[in-house]
């Protein structure tokens, strides 16, 4: 029973580490392509700007963590806060703004809740739409601000920690397998010794019987 539980826990831990590494590489690719990383249809992003400051319930302050859900373009409604691929100062970026109406060129017209913002010049279409905002986390602002300012350091540290954990887990698995092999060998040796002793006793008994005759 103990071996089964140990094997099960080891398997679960190994699976978690493999998934972590997979998420890490998928996340790297997502960052390079400036795409949200969805896990079970949800993703999150730190909002570093003040473009969504407003008086609505789903307005977003700087360094709030926005939780977004993958959705189809047909799910969008006027008033939704959505994430789409756009540009900030000529640099490709993911933007989170509110849908305020239909765009004259097709698609949807968007704008940040901040009164100082102007209407976004380009429409949101099926090609650049990414997700719909669901909720936000506000109590982690200090950590979010630190993560935004030190993203490369934190990401590098995360990679290092995950690699170390995987190496330690592999070493633990090797030790477990080696220990099991040693235990099997020890049990086999005990069985062989018992068999040898049994044969020796049996031989002695035969010799005794032969001498009595």
Image: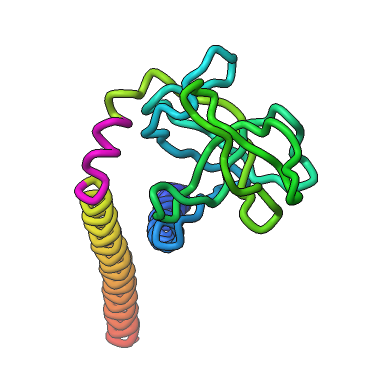
Rendered location of residue 144, percent (x, y): 32, 31
Dominant SS in magenta: helix
In the image, taking residue 26 as reference, residue 147 lies left or right, namely: left
Q: Residue at x 41, y 27 (%)?
A: 50
Residue 57 forms part of the magenta stretch = no
Is residue 7 something one can see in this rendering? no
Q: Residue 212 or 170: which is nearer the viewer?
A: 170
Vertical arrangement, residue 197 with respect to residue 81, above or below: below
Q: Residue furthest right?
A: 74
Is residue 117 something one can see in this rendering? yes
Q: Residue at x 76, y 34 (%)?
A: 77
Q: Residue 19 or 182: which is nearer the viewer?
A: 19
In the image, taking residue 20 as reference, residue 192 lies left or right, namely: left
In the rendered image, which quarter is residue 128 located in?
A: bottom right
Vertical arrangement, residue 106 with respect to residue 68, above or below: below
Total marks shown come to 0
Q: Residue at x 26, y 59 (%)?
A: 163
Q: Tell me the magenta residue range.
A: 144-153
In the rendered image, which quarter is residue 75 located in?
A: top right
Q: Residue 204 or 106: which is nearer the viewer?
A: 106
Rendered location of residue 24, percent (x, y): 38, 57
Rendered location of residue 57, percent (x, y): 59, 15
Q: Residue at x 40, y 62 (%)?
A: 32
- The colour scheme of the drawn protein is rainbow
Vertical arrangement, residue 143 with respect to residue 160, above or below: above
Q: Residue 104 or 92: which is nearer the viewer?
A: 104
Q: Quadrant of the C terminus?
A: bottom left
In the rendered image, which quarter is residue 207 located in?
A: bottom left
Rendered location of residue 12, percent (x, y): 46, 51
């Amino acid at each position: 029973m103990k071996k089964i539980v140990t094997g099960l826990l080891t398997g679960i831990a190994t699976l978690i580490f493999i998934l972590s590494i997979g998420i890490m590489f998928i996340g790297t690719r997502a960052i390079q392509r400036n795409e949200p990383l969805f896990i079970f249809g949800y993703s999150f992003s730190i909002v570093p700007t003040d473009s969504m400051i407003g008086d609505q319930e789903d307005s977003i302050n700087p360094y709030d963590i926005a939780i977004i859900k993958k959705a189809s373009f047909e799910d969008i409604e006027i008033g939704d806060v959505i994430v789409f691929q756009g540009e900030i100062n000529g640099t490709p970026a993911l933007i989170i703004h509110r849908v305020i109406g239909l765009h004259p060129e097709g698609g949807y017209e968007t704008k940040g809740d901040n009164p100082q913002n102007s209407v976004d010049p380009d429409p949101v279409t099926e090609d650049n739409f990414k997700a719909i905002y669901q909720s936000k986390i506000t109590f982690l602002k200090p950590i979010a601000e630190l993560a935004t300012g030190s993203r490369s350091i934190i990401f590098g540290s995360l990679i290092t920690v995950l690699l170390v954990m995987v190496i330690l887990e592999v070493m633990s698995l090797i030790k477990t397998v080696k220990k099991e092999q040693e235990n099997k060998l020890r049990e086999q040796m005990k069985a062989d010794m018992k068999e040898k002793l049994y044969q020796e006793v049996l031989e002695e008994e035969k010799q005794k019987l032969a001498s009595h005759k």
